Image: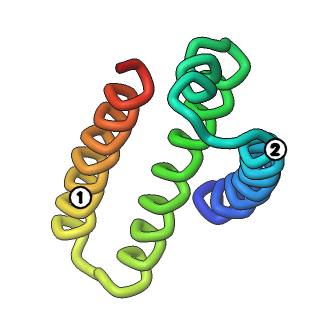
């Protein structure tokens, strides 16, 4: 039940943050200086971190829910959960490295 609710709330959050991101990002031309200025701003860092965290958790939670529907053995479910945590951690750290670079 909690993962079902998280999927809905994270989807709504993603839509809101994506709208903000796209509407503000495309008002000015995309140049290196603009990107450097945006990535040094706490607002943009928070927005990008939020988008990163919500998108990774939303995607992996969706895969977890699919696994819950089709995988009946508890050992395989635990293995799926472990793999999804590893993938999620890797993707989040990779995103952090890109944003903080």
Image quarter where the N terminus lies is bottom right
Q: Which mark is residue 27?
A: 2
Mark with earlier residue (2, 1): 2
Q: Nearer the viewer, residue 66 or 37?
A: 37
Which residue corresponds to the image point at 18% horizontal and 69% vertical from the top-left?
A: 76
What is the quadrant of residue 21 in the picture? top right
- Tell me if 53 is positioned left or right of 19 in this view: left
Q: Which mark is residue 18?
A: none
Where is 84 relative to 33, above or below? below
- Tell me if 6 is positioned left or right of 85 in this view: right
Indicate the secondary structure of the residue bearing disc 2. Answer: loop
Which residue corresponds to the image point at 48% horizontal and 62% vertical from the top-left?
A: 59
Q: Position of residue 33 (x, y in %)?
A: 57, 22
- Tell me if 48 is positioned left or right of 92 in this view: right
The residue to which callout 1 is attached is 78
Q: Residues within 10 Å of mark 1 (few under 14, many from 20)?
A: few
Which residue corresponds to the image point at 32% horizontal and 44% vertical from the top-left?
A: 91
Which residue corresponds to the image point at 38% horizontal and 36% vertical from the top-left?
A: 95
């Amino acid at each position: 039940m909690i993962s079902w609710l998280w999927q809905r709330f994270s989807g709504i959050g993603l839509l809101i943050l994506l709208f903000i991101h796209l509407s503000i990002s495309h008002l000015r031309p995309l140049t290196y200086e603009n990107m450097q200025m945006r990535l040094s701003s706490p607002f943009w860092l928070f927005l990008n971190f939020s988008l990163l965290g919500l998108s990774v958790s939303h995607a992996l939670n969706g895969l977890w829910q699919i696994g819950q529907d089709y995988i009946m053995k508890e050992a395989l479910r635990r293995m799926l959960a472990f793999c999804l945590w590893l993938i999620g951690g890797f993707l989040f750290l990779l995103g952090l490295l890109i944003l903080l670079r």
